[in-house]
Amino acid sequence: MIDVRNPADGFTSLRARIHALGDPGPNGCGADSAPLTVGEWALLIDDIVAHPESNTEPLWNVADPEDDDREFDAIFIGGGAAGRFGSAALRARGGRQLTIDAWPFLGGSCPHQACVPHHLFSEVARELDLARHMQERLWYPPFDEKRASILDVIELFKAGRGYPHAIMNWQSKEQLDMEYILNARATLIDARTVEVAGQRFTARNLVLCTGAHTVFPEIAGIGLKGVYDYSSLIEELDYEPNRCVIIGGSKVAMEYGSFFHATGCKTTILTRSPLMRTASLHHVDEGLRDYVIAMMADRGIEIVQDAEPVEVLGNGKVTGIRYRTADGHEHQIDTDFVFVGTGERPNLDMYAPLGLATDERGFVIADTHMRTNVPGVYAAGDLVGPPMEMFKARKCGVGAARNIMGEDYEFDYTQYPDFLHTTYEVTWCGLSEAEARNRYRNVIKIQMPPDDADPENFALPAAEGSMIYAFTRPILSGWLKLVIDADTRKILGAHHVGYGAKDAFQYIDYLIRRPEGFTMDEMAELNELFLNPEHFIQLCRLRAGQAMPVNL
Ligand code: COM
């Protein structure tokens, strides 16, 4: 056991290991009683991740009973977004928690294999898209496909991910006063008791936050080398793919597919349902969808709908994929890289003793207080099903903590703003135009480019991130729509493709969902920071003078 709380005892081996790894920098060799710095944490975590077989000792950050012998209010199993935020919320309210994770860091899959690399990949995709589009113009050199490497970007990520991990461990211990045991698997004994590293801990409550994993389709060849999901891509890819086939039409499929393709790895997406029309995405506006799909196709991504994968071909290693289309015909694509983006299922195996109620897809059923069917057992994060988004994971964890600490707190995550990346940032909230027309009799929209404009010659929207496109090929510069009930003048939905508008959508969503709503006139009173990516403020101002507003 490495007692990260008690440097005087446990740090000898820890520091020896850190020193053996290299110079930890000016703050790394302080007095034995100094807490681990972020740099030291990074070295330690990197070492454990790189050599798990020789690093089996748990990282122990539990108060000595002489300092704190209170009963735990909750044990959080899993220290990802749900577990970490829930733990912090419980601690902030004066409670005592213990967080346990099999990984040597807090933060879960997000900073290790999921959201953080996805955001790096999406930024790379955007950069590559511009570099390819502008090649041999201005200062842009010819685009060298050989230098845009998926493997290089993954290596870049892996070389740097120790720091986010380190910050989470450091912040959780030094600033949030959390207690945790990391690099150790918990075994559930009963609804109050967990065993970890040979020791039993009991608590008034358990909060289950162990996340989810990709479901691989059950087809021949799916186990071949060369088939990856978001997690094995990071840990196991060891060659540069030349051709990619994606199975599935999820957000993950669109996002990773756009990245792979932008690096020059020709990508085909095989999807059963049309992209962005799956049940897991709500309120998708058809105009926004059309633009997103058209722009993916414009980049050369091939999208095959109604496609059913039949077999991954290969002899030890992937060489192709066979799939069937709706007309019953089978087709084959030669490829050395298959990526699975078909959706996720919860990590539940360890909870068998509890008898948890689950839904038809296997996700844990939790009420709006995050309570499961087992008294005293809460569930949070991906375990309770979609949306598999950060806000939901964190706020579920916080919700469980608040209820455990005596509040009556409900969290409804059925309505929320949403986003995805292609080479663009795609954001939306509220109602789509079609949904609005179903519910209101006098719906208008503010849209750019308008339906009757030729987008190849209509150089708006344009803002930070899309100016170069606007001046070179206007259609690439983005798309936006605001949906308004003309009778009440309330904004019903907002939709945007471009760059830099995501922040605004967090607030627009909040404003339009208030009981009193948010009118186009109120939007027109805001002060835009020109050239504001979403353009909504000035466009509302142009229309706000009309007693009965019409389309713009
Ligand atoms: C984010 C992880 S990468 S957490 O939500 O801050 O724990």
Image: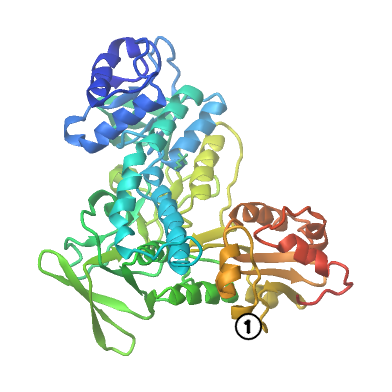
Q: Residue at x 17, y 71 (%)?
A: 319
Residue 487 occupies quadrant? bottom right
Q: Is residue 381 above or below residue 266?
A: above
Is 16 or 182 nearer to us in this picture? 16
Q: Nearer the viewer, residue 531 or 322?
A: 531
Q: Is residue 534 left or right of residue 62?
A: right
Residue drawn at x 35%, y 48% as measured from the top left: 113
Q: Position of residue 373 (x, y in %)?
A: 44, 47
Seen at 28% across and 21% down, the residue is 2
| Percent coordinates x, y for residue 236 in the rendering | 23, 51
SS at circle 1: loop
Whether 370 is drawn above or below 124: the answer is above
The answer to whether any part of residue 217 appears in the image is: yes
Name which quarter of the figure residue 472 lies in. bottom right
Q: Is residue 522 above or below residue 201?
A: below
Q: Can the viewer see residue 284 in this picture?
A: no
| Horizontal relation, residue 49 to residue 111: left or right | left
Q: Taking 124 as reference, is 104 left or right?
A: left
Residue at (24% x, 59% y) in the render: 240
- Foreground residue, 353 or 13? 13
Q: Look at mark 1 in the image and give the residue it sits on.
A: 454
